[in-house]
Amino acid sequence: MNWKLSLNIALTHLLTKKKQSIVAMLGVTFGISMFIIMISFMTGVNQFTEDLAMDNTPHVHIYKSIEIEDKKIVALDKPAGDSNWYVVKHQRPKNELSKIKNGLAVMERIENMPGVRGVAPQVSTQVFYNNGPVQIPGTVFGVDVKKQADLFDLDKKMDLGELNDLLKGSDVIIMGKGLAKKMGVTIGDRVSVTTPEGGNLNLKIVGIFSYGIAQLDQTQSYATLATVQKILQKDPSYVTDLNLKMKDVNAASALAKSLENQLPDVKIEDWETANQSILAGTQIRNIMTFVVCFTLLVVAGFGIYNIMNMNIINKMKDIAILKATGFQGADVTGIFMLQSVMIGIAGGFFGLIIGFFFSYLLSITPFPAGEFFRIDTFPVNFNPVHYFIGLFFGFLTTLFAGWFPSRKAAKVDPVQIIRG
Amino acid sequence: MATVLKAENIKKKFFQPTEFEVLKGLDFEVHEGEFFSIIGKSGCGKSTLLYILSTMDTDYDGTMHIKGEQLTGKTQNQLSKFRNEHLGFVFQFHFLLPEFTALKNVMLPALKLGKYSEKEIEHRAIEKLRLVGMDEFAHKHANRLSGGQQQRVAIARALVNDPAIIMGDEPTGNLDKANSMRVFDIFKQLAEENKQTIITVTHDHDFANGSDRIMEMEDGRILGIEPPTEPTPYIK
């Protein structure tokens, strides 16, 4: 089969019927550009919500959980001759510290494990923020400031003040935006916190942060490890949580499993277990994105199929002539496949450009997200992989859409056409 | 004279709308450089026979040889190749590719054959166009030419690969007297000077009377193959 000749004929066909070729091309262009816009925007949104949830979520969370062991206590010293069992029901937990044993040593050990990016120690406690006579319940986290910034980007969530201000004074705290608003306080004001055990400390606010998640911003505040240990009246080795970040997120559950064997007296939870609902949401959105995008490509494919079919019906006479003068079935298939493929490539290429242009416009469009969200424009993901996928599938659909009409063209019986 | 085409016991049946035997066993030979006409009433099977001879219709009984090669039983692709190289066609309706220039239309079968370089093919195509008096229209688009002009370009296309046999299905059926005479002269010249064989199906008795032998058909049978007896205005 003579490719150069087929290409020559295909090109002549396309260029003679410019209008028809452009309409066919626009079908692909529209499909691919919508695909790019949709997938960029949808994955941008997914990425945004995932970041929102993942930024302050540890990949593995180690903490001491106070829970009742599900073991029935049986009275041991039964009187002689008594054949009954005495079972204690409704046990209460014993007074146990929520401290992780040798917390800081464990932390160092885990930090040296392969695949671990870092471990941030944390002391957390339920508190009441006292605002005049009103008490607002919430949580104070004592953290290692540098690690919290490194691993959880807390420094990037600051609305007012700097995270490092926590290191500059003693008895200082940074507060969630919603919480500060509720209490009517801002930087420089003082607030008194009380623990359930009765510990009390007067703290100065040096910063306001917001995660963009109301539930967190309305209850949380951060201070240094030492400050919270002071509120709780505990020693410097008192650590209640270890928050791990992995180099590879997907290795988290494997590490959690191996840690479970090494640290039997603490509870270990990986992010997948903790965030199942978010993961499910992301997965459903991804499926939807792909269904919509796939549909767009199929619609574009049908457009090409129709136009190629029409084209071939119009060209029956020409096909008969080509065959009568010695062109083979494969040559005819080649001519029409090449047309289809050229439409696909040109249309796909323009689709990418238009898709990029519109997703760029979208990415600079202001987005009124409300005061909690930390974005001002629509989240758009510019991933080159999407552009390759778009071009590839655009090419593939035109290949399929062109194949069946082209096969039909190859089977044209010249005698029937020429005899009329 | 050498035999260029030999048909033995050619039979063909149509099944639509009802079973009907259109060719009832034909035997004949055509010689090299012969101008061979097939005449007969409509429906006698002469066009059907021509399409079998042209190798485009493969659904028949009997055997056919062209240039000593048996073509019956070959695959479509083999036949396409054979047609490309050894056969030329001229149809009643001129059937040029409308998107291409006259020159390109003539060049296409040669480009497909790929025996010569593109430059050479163009040169040869222009020569063939000159032979049919169309060289000055070479770069005109096919759909801008008149019917007679298109038919002459179609003849040039049939000639471009120097085929052994040129077949025409009522090549003058759609043309006026002047253009018909031109086509006839070209055919006559090809047969006499180039020793190319011409086989045409025609309704035009004057045209047939200018040929070397006439095969008359009726109801799927050969009535007779004889040289023409009547004079014709085509030959002055």
Image (cartoon, grey):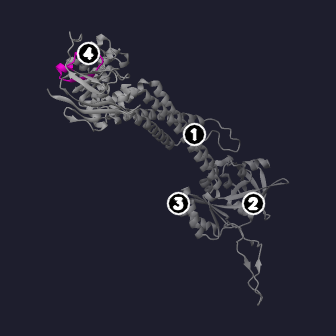
**Which span of residues is magenta-colored?**
B190-213
Return the x and y of residue B78 as percentages of the image width and height.
Answer: 28, 37
Label 1 and label 4 in one chain: no
Quarter of the image for residue A90 reads bottom right
Pick whichever, B179 or A235, lies toward us.
Answer: B179
Q: Is residue B189 visible?
A: yes
Local secondary structure at mark 3: loop
Tag 2 or tag 3, which sits nearer the N-term?
3
> Circle 2 — which element?
strand
Task: Point out residue B228 in the picture as x, y percentages from the top left corner.
Answer: 20, 17
Question: Which quarter shows the N terminus of chain A?
Answer: top left
Query: Label 2: which residue?
Result: A126
Which one is closest to the eye, mark 2 or mark 4? 4
Query: Which residue is identified by label 1?
Result: A38
Report the mark closest to the observer, 1 or 4: 4
**Residue depicted at 64% across the width and 58% down the height:** A274
Q: State whether discs 2 and 1 lie on one chain.
A: yes
**How many angstroms separate mark 3 from mark 2 (CA)?**
32 Å
> Marks 3 and 4, Cα distance to the nearest angstrom?
93 Å
- Residue type at numbered disc 1: Met
Q: Residue furthest bottom?
A: A80
